[in-house]
Image: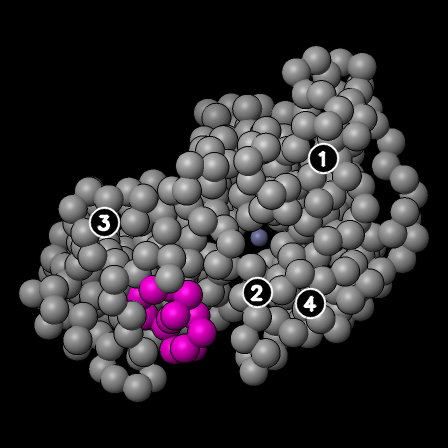
């Protein structure tokens, strides 16, 4: 079968690989769609980072070349002998987190903080940029019939946004600001809205992404390159919002996300950074602001709280994946129309779905 395989930096090849074998505890998934993520781009442009280059990944035991793609779902076409609660024909989303199962975090049920954390499609275990993939039954959650199966690929990024909001400290009726509305920032906007935020501010330099933020629920959008977005936000909120989210991964947005939080407010950092950043710790001390990180989403034998909630929230319209999808492409076009398109800001792609 065909799959997109990571061989090294700027070397992703769509090639023939072996058909997956279905173990007793596995389900075989025919991939409906797999999203291209920022971390895929980092691997392509600057990797290997997460991809095991030299040392085998401790959970998968694999090194590159490995198939890519960790945001995916599709239709079950076969189940292993021990699988009794998933049927052929079911549509599922796949929680790609790989965990060891016996470090201090795994034994406490905090699988996404595992010391050996990895992801299917980045660390081995197959990938979603392929016609099919066999995964352990515990990694799949059922996906409702009323939602198009391709949107099962969006359960992963929406779980990131939902997890960030669940990690933040704010209550219904509070004001929220989101710095950066790329695909994950857009899921944070939607999750904050769903959690009962009063006013959601979105700060984003790209016009297309600001418009999308407004479409998915931001009340006020601000362009940091054209106006003093921060000053406007502080004026309108009597000195700061209750909770801010940093989803851009640069120094300026970290600093702004801290300043934009009111005294005693919460700052949640969701980005992955390429470099160290500097900020004024007195803003934390003198304002008693709390900074926290939020990574991925819960995982474990039952798929994790966010992965279980998002499909139902798609079905009832609380979360809407549709506006995020800017392009749908074939597997063979993944480099030219996928990775290269996302790395070119002029092409203004948001979430690209690969439909193998
Ligand atoms: Zn991702
Ligand atoms: Zn572990």
Residue 150 locus on image (x, y percent): 64, 47
Q: Secondary structure at mark 2?
A: strand
Q: Is residue 323 left or right of residue 138?
A: left
Q: Could you tell me if the residues under marks 1 and 3 are in contact, i.e. CB atoms within 8 Å?
A: no
Whichever of callouts 1 and 3 sits on the residue coming sooner in the sequence is: 1
Distance CA(mark 3)–CA(mark 4)? 34 Å
Q: Secondary structure at mark 3?
A: loop
| Comparing labels 1 and 3, the label whose residue is closer to the camera | 1
In this rendered view, identify the residue nearer to me: 39 or 347: 347
Whichever of callouts 2 and 1 sits on the residue coming sooner in the sequence is: 1
Q: Residue at x 92, y 53 (%)?
A: 16
Whichever of callouts 3 and 2 sits on the residue coming sooner in the sequence is: 3
Count every numbered label the image shows and give the total.
4
Residue 2 locus on image (x, y percent): 87, 52
Let me know if residue 138 is in the magenta part. Answer: no
Let me know if residue 213 is in the magenta part. Answer: yes
Distance CA(mark 1)–CA(mark 3)? 35 Å
Q: Quadrant of residue 258?
A: bottom left
Distance CA(mark 4)–CA(mark 1)? 23 Å
User: What residue does disc 1 label?
Assistant: 75
Secondary structure character of the magenta stretch overall: helix
User: What residue does disc 4 label?
Assistant: 338
Q: Secondary structure at mark 1?
A: strand
In this rendered view, identify the residue nearer to me: 80 or 30: 30
Q: Residue at x 17, y 77 (%)?
A: 231
Q: Is mark 4 within 8 Å of ligand 1?
A: no
The residue range painted magenta reads 202-214
Q: Secondary structure at mark 4?
A: helix
In this rendered view, identify the residue nearer to me: 295 or 327: 327
Residue 197, numbered label: 3
Distance CA(mark 4)–CA(mark 2)? 11 Å
Q: Quadrant of residue 152?
A: top right
């Amino acid at each position: 079968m065909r799959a997109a395989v990571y061989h090294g930096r700027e070397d992703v090849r769509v090639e023939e690989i072996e058909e997956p074998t279905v173990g007793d505890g596995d389900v075989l998934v025919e991939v409906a769609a797999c999203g291209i993520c920022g971390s895929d781009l980092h691997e392509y442009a600057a990797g290997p980072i997460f991809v095991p280059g030299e040392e085998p990944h401790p959970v998968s035991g694999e090194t590159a070349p490995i198939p890519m793609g960790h945001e995916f779902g599709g239709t079950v076409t076969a189940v292993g002998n021990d699988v009794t609660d998933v049927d052929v024909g079911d549509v599922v989303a796949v929680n790609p987190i790989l965990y060891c199962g016996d470090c201090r975090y795994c034994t406490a049920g905090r699988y996404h903080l595992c010391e050996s954390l990895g992801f299917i499609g980045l660390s081995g275990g197959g990938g979603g940029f392929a016609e099919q993939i066999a995964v352990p039954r515990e990694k799949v959650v059922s996906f409702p019939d009323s939602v198009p199966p391709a949107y099962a690929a969006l359960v992963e990024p929406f779980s990131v946004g939902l997890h960030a909001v669940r990690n933040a400290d704010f209550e219904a009726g509070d004001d929220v600001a989101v710095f950066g509305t790329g695909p994950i920032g857009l899921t944070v906007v939607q999750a904050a809205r769903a959690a009962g935020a009063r006013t959601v501010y979105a700060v984003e330099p790209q016009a297309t992404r600001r418009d999308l933020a407004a479409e998915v629920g931001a009340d006020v959008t601000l362009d940091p390159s054209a106006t003093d977005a921060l000053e406007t936000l502080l004026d309108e909120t009597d000195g700061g919002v209750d909770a801010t989210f940093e989803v851009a991964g640069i120094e300026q947005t970290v600093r702004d996300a801290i300043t934009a939080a009111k005294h005693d407010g919460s700052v949640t950092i969701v980005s992955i950074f390429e470099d160290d950043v500097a900020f004024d710790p007195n803003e934390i001390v003198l304002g008693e602001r709390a900074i926290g990180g939020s990574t991925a989403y819960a995982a474990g034998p039952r798929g994790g709280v966010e992965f279980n909630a998002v499909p139902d929230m798609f079905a009832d319209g609380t979360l809407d994946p549709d506006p995020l999808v800017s392009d749908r492409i074939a597997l063979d076009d993944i480099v030219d129309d996928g990775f290269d398109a996302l790395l070119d800001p002029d092409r203004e792609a948001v979430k690209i779905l690969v439909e193998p």
